[in-house]
Image (cartoon, rainbow, N blue to C red):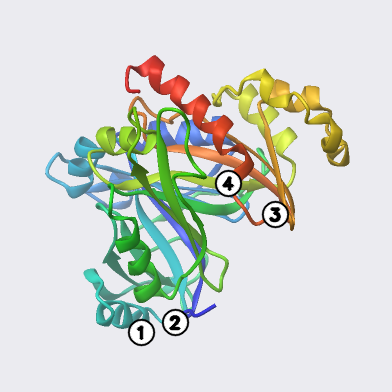
Amino acid sequence: MSDIYSIKGVDHLEFYVGNAKQAAIVYAQCFGFTTTAYRGLETGDRKVTSYVLEQGEIRFVLSSALSPEYPIAQSVLKHGDTIAIIALQVSDVATAYQQAIACGAIGAIPPTDHEDEHGVLRYAAIRSFGDVLVKFVDRSNYGDNFAPGFAARANTPSNAAGLKRIDHIVGNVEYGAMDQWVNFFVKTMGFDVRMHFDDQAISTEYSALMSKVLENGSKTIININEPAPGRRKSQIQEYLDFHYGPGIQHLGLATDDIVQTVIYLKQAGVEFLPIPKTYYDGLEAWVKELEIPVEQLAALGILVDRDEDGYLLQLFTKPMGDRPTLFFEVIERHGSRGFGAGNFKSLFVALEREQALRGNL
């Protein structure tokens, strides 16, 4: 790997939402997250309310504006609920920011020290595709609290749903822009291109997309998708139309026991993309090594794929909001470092069926 500076991994992802309090309840009750910190009127913040939710190594921040003029409110008006900030832990915020700017990035927040009784939290941010910010964070001189201005909640993060870590982050950009943003992550943050899927690999009778997979030394993975010309509107173009521009389409959330995780999520009310039962015809010959009956995979809608390194299991939620934009993938890896290439056809057919129901195919 060729990291320009040391990126240690994902610190958190910040969502801009219409109602952070209600969103926090959904992520807690449906996805098993625990609220560990809060800021808002009660903590002296007159502009923003935020809830920090954790599970395993995953940390989400859900933020809403307290006035219509605040940028978060403008973001929600345009995009709906969206992931607005990818926060990366780095060893030196100033170096990360300066080198990114020197390599062509546009600054959003200059290197800043924010101090309170817990110590000094350092951060900075640059702009990436759409309105998404990439934030550099250094917690080495800061205590256990999330950030200045936040009050800790007396809750110990649980692993209720069995979600362990962020496996990958997927961004959608407009047609012809994929290579531009791939080069941006390569040049400004030292990511490497690990895989490339063209419109021959990811296509159906009606639509197609192209995708490149980026990874750095910390195993942080960011995928960039763009639509490809097709007979009908692709799911990427549908996202761009309803998000009103590029943004983060979905997160891959890793689990070590996908069966139990999916059972928990389904019982909690999470809706998943339905997979045709014909997908499971012929799987039994090789899925015996999984020790999961094909009937159970079919009942839960879990997809299976394998490559030279091993296999993976995955499935996808329906969109989290009224707009067909942000959704989640649940994934369990056993050696495979891919993204279910063998499932692309079945997945896209299922996605197009949902698009048709929405009148967007």
What is the C-alpha distance between the residues marked 1 and 3?
Answer: 34 Å
Task: Tell me the quarter of the image containing the N terminus.
Answer: bottom right
Query: Considering only order in the chain, which callout, 3 or 4, is on the residue closer to the N terminus?
Result: 4
Q: Is residue 316 left or right of residue 116?
A: right
Q: Are marks 1 and 2 in contact (CB under 8 Å)?
A: yes
Task: State the residue at coordinates (32%, 17%).
Answer: 359
Q: Secondary structure at mark 4?
A: strand
Please give the name of the residue rendered at 35% of the width and 42% of the height, measured from the top-left corner: 228
- Circle 4 is placed at which residue position? 253
Quarter holding residue 234: top left
Q: CA distance from mark 1 to mark 2?
A: 8 Å
Judged by depth in the image, the label closer to the viewer, 4 or 3, is: 3
Circle 3 sits on which residue? Answer: 336
Residue toward you, 304 or 19: 304
Asked whether the beta carbons under mark 2 and mark 3 sit within 8 Å of each other, the answer is no
Q: First in sequence: mark 4 or mark 1?
A: 1
The Cα atoms of the two marked residues, 2 and 3, are separated by 27 Å
Badge 4: residue crowd in 10 Å (few <14, some 14–19, many ≥20): many
Mark 2–mark 4 Cα distance, whole angstroms, equals 26 Å
